[in-house]
Structure formats: structure tokens, C-alpha cells
Amino acid sequence: MSVLTTPTAVRTATAWWRHAAIYQIYVRSFADGNGDGMGDLAGVRGRLPYLRDLGVDALWFNPWYLSPMADGGYDVADYRDIDPMFGTLAEAEQLIGEAHAEGLRVIVDLVPNHCSDQHRWFQQALAAGPGSAERERFWFTAGRGEDGELPPNDWQSYFGGPAWTRLTEADGTPGPWYLHMFAPEQPDLNWEHPEVRAEFEDILHFWLKRGVDGFRIDVAHGLAKKPGLPDVGPDPDPQDLPYQDCDDVHDIYRSWRRISDGYNGERAFVGEVWLPTPEQFARYLRPDELHSAFNFDFLCCPWDADALRRVIDTTLAAHRPVAAPPTWVLSNHDTIRHVTRYGRRDTSFDMGDKRLGDPSDLVLGRRRGRAAALLTLALPGGVYIYQGDELGLAEVQDLPDHLIQDPTFVRSQGSDRGRDGCRVPLPWSGGSPSLGFSPDRAAAAPWLPQPAGWEHLSVEAQEADPDSTLALYRAGLALRRERLTGLPETLEWTTTGDGVVSFAREGGFHCLVNLSPAPVALPSGGVVLLSSGPLASGPAGSELVPVDTCVWFSGGVPDSAG
Ligand code: GLC
């Protein structure tokens, strides 16, 4: 077994994470190397040249660890091994080395809030029985009511239903309840326990020694719980919930930061932090805690100029005091793909109410999606691209019930159709039954069916079309690298009228998005670098930026908005 500790070409001391373009790989749906209908590490290894040519700086892998897959791998049974569905640990090590050789950094997903009910610790806890030390690593608590028949408190799982499940002991008697903020197969770990802390520190070392450049931290706001696990109550303050953003969580990240800082090459954390206020959010990004976190306010924002400007301003203002780089993300494996969101009447996103089935005009959504892509690539900070964004894929909203695997579907009794619609296997080429996702003559069909028409969105089809969304992403990423990498993390708003988002970066780079109902003039003297759609001709040789179009240009003199 090779352990990758040596610095590679990709390792420099620059703070790459401040401005990286990071591509998210949902392994199961990216590319299938062995023909079983599931994406795997062999599939990723075969597509590294594609990712290099796309022009991203790093890859974030959703969990690839040993898992019963009750929640797509976010139920980890062994944090130090790879699920056989995806490959082996040796293959993961090879993949890390090969990615580095292509100039791509690697970020792995760390899931510390909970593990799988098949994890050895939980199995030991079940076997060891009531009152045992093994149970202290989780939240086992006696129920309320005369016979303990009621859950210990009123917390609800994020996936619907109570956050507690009652055990039946080995001898058949009803036992205590255990906490799971997600599915019952995902028991929450007790972060007050020193062994839990020590175990995750060791897991960090395990992957850092294998050369990973960073960690995406799942449910980063959720690890610490309020002492005594009090009820939420009927009218909770969303800023003061007993199961999220409890002060002790920051201590965990300070200890992790000390670990990552001990390795060469700027290893970085990105937190999944869903919290109601920018102030709470920014506390995770203090200089001795996480390097960065996902900016979900931007993802949730409707396609509206005022709202976008506001959220960009709030984001920059929240990051400034802690000197952390902002991040920009349009879609991920939990949300409705932005092409679909932006084609709806209500273009905002709400995790608790995904409105699957709301009608969407996908031609409109794709046009706006292309404009939004250039907007995110122009903003200061890091940017995340979810696999398939670069192909303009839409949410698949009509998956048959019997194929849906997301636990939210079952736990919400079907009222939430879940997240599988953004996890459909990628189309790589026309022709073959799996659109190139699996090798020819594969033994099995893709684990979720690809919709009719996706052959026109395949990588192969888009590579042949200079106006494709893939071509736009490639051009945008290349220009971003050339013009924007390393610039100060600031922008200056420029005015060009209502309904327009328009700003300048240092070095004479301008970005203008027209969200108004009519075309707007490109400022005179502006030299177009790239646009998300064709510009139109205006009077006297001027150029017009059509509705829902983003243009990058240099020079030109839009008025400064201060
Ligand atoms: C995060 C993940 C999501 C998962 C949940 C529980 O929100 O992004 O996919 O279901 O955590 O681990």
C-alpha cells in the first residue's frame, strides 16, 4: 500500500482555497468503470483528463467510504475504507496521486455528526447493553412517559419524523432511545466524549497522510448539542436551537485546524454550514477555525437583481471581518438543479419545501443558468460546480417512485420526493443505452434512469458545439484563471440601470448580468471577453446585452455606484 506523503506538483504554499474552482463529484452518478450501473473510482480515474480540460482546480468527492448506503454514503460504516461499490482504498490512493499529476487537488467528505448503525461502535453499543461505556459514544437516553414509551425530547429529524428511535434490547425488552438527526440508520455521535474527538482527529491524519488537500465537513453546524438536550418547544428561536450552532462546536474546529496546519501544502476545510444569520455563519470562519464554508444564501436567492446584489453584499460583509474567502454555489447533491429553479415562476430555493413538480420553462432556466454560471465565476472567492452543471442538466422530476432511494422520500411519506432528481447518472455520449455512463455491454442499467433527450446534452454532443454550456464553462474557467485568480477579494458595483447586476474587479475586468425585462446597452468602449449568450446590435454600432444574459468585458466606463 502506498501512502502519499510526498509533496507533488500540485502542492505549493499558496492559499489555493481562497480562489479555487472546485468540481463536486457524486461518485455513484459520475462514471461507471466496471459496468454494474453505479459510478465508481475507476470511472473517475478514466475521466480525469475531462476534469483537467474543464479547467477546475480541485475535486470534492461525496462520501466514498464503506457504507450500507441508507443515505447515499452519508451513513459511514468505516471512515478508513472505500465502499466496494466504488472500489478499494488502494484505488483511492491511486486516484489522489493521478489527480495531483493532472494539477487537480482532492477534497474528501468528512461525516462527523453521525455514523452508520452498522459502524463497529454502534454495533458494540447495541451488544454491550444498557448503561455500558460503549453507549456513551452516542446519545442513548431513557424515554419519557410511564414506561419510557415517549421520545426523550421533541426534536424532529431533518428527514422528517422524530429524531429518536427506541431500541429493543437483545432479550426483547424495550430499551432506551437513541438520537439521529437524520435517518435512524445514522445515529448521532456524542461529541462530548473524548474518544469521539480522538477518533476523528485520527481519521483526519489518515486521509491527510494519503495526500488529500482538504475536507468538506458534513453538517458542520450540528456536532455539539445543548447540554441536557432540552426541548425545542412550540415557538423556537431559529438562532438558538439546541441541536445546532452550540458553542462547543468551535472548539472542535480549532483542534482540527491545528492538525491541518501541521501538514505541508495548505490543506483546507470547507464547512457545510446552514444557519439563519451571516454572523453565526462567519464565526466558523475565524482564522483558527475552518478556511471556508458553502454560501447557501446565494444558492437560495431568487433570480432577481436587487436580491442578488443584496446577498452578494451581505456575503462579502460577513466574510470581511474574519478575512475568509466567500464561496459561490448554484447547485449540489441536496438541492434542485438551478436550471430547473430558474425556469420556475418562483426562482428561490427552500430546502424544506423543494416544490418538486412545479412547472419549469427549461429553455429560460438554461439561459439564466448560463448567465448565473458566469456571474459566479466572476465573483471574488471560491466557486463550486456540481457535476452536470457544466452540461446545463435539469432536475429529473419524474423518477418512478419504486426507484427513488433517498430516505427523505420514505420518511416524509412521499410528500418530499427527495434529492435523487439531481443525482441521475451523467450523459457522456449519445448512442449507448447508458449514454456512455457505463462501458458498452455493461451488465446493468444506470442505477437511476436518464431521461429522454439527454443524449443532446452529453459531453460528446457539447464538445462538438462551440456554443454549448460545456464550452461556456471551459472558456469561463480559463478566463477566470487568467484574469481573476489572485486578485483582491473585492468588487466595485457599477450602475447601468434597474434590474442589472454589474460590477468591476481589479485590472479592468467587468461583469454585467441583465435581469431586467429589456436589453441594456453594453457600456461604450467595453471589449467583450465572454458572454453567456449572443449580444445584439444596437443603434450606431453599439452592442446590447439581451435579457438574462451575462457579459464579461474589459475597459468601458460604467458609472461607479460606490
Ligand atoms: C448533508 C449532506 C446530505 C446528507 C446529510 C446527512 O446535508 O449534504 O446529503 O443527507 O448531510 O449526512
Image (tube, rainbow, N blue to C red):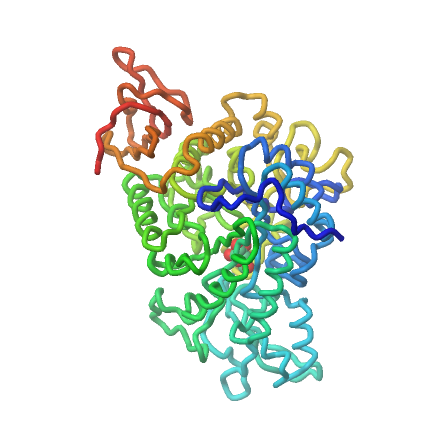
Question: Quarter of the image holding residue 562?
Answer: top left
Residue 415 is situated, as x and y percent measured from the top left of the image, at 50, 56
Kindly tell me whether residue 408 is visible in this rendering.
no
Question: Quarter of the image holding residue 55?
Answer: top right
Residue 432 is situated, as x and y percent measured from the top left of the image, at 70, 30
For the point 67% across and 63% down, which residue is it?
A: 77
Is 279 drawn above or below residue 456 in the view shown?
below
Is 83 drawn above or below residue 33 in the view shown?
below
For the point 64% across and 33% down, which residue is it?
A: 49
Does residue 144 appear to the left or right of 403 in the view shown? left
Does residue 364 appear to the left or right of 321 in the view shown? right
Is 269 drawn above or below residue 224 in the view shown?
above
Q: How many marks?
A: 0
Kindly tell me whether residue 4 is visible in this rendering.
yes
| Most foreground residue, 290 or 353 | 290
Residue 167 is situated, as x and y percent measured from the top left of the image, at 62, 77
Which residue sits furthest bottom? Answer: 146
| Most foreground residue, 286 or 248 | 286
For the point 51% across and 77% down, which residue is it?
A: 151
For the point 72% across and 51% down, which residue is it?
A: 85
Question: Quarter of the image holding residue 499?
Answer: top left
| Most foreground residue, 290 or 32 | 290
Residue 444 is situated, as x and y percent measured from the top left of the image, at 74, 42
Which residue sits furthest top? Answer: 540
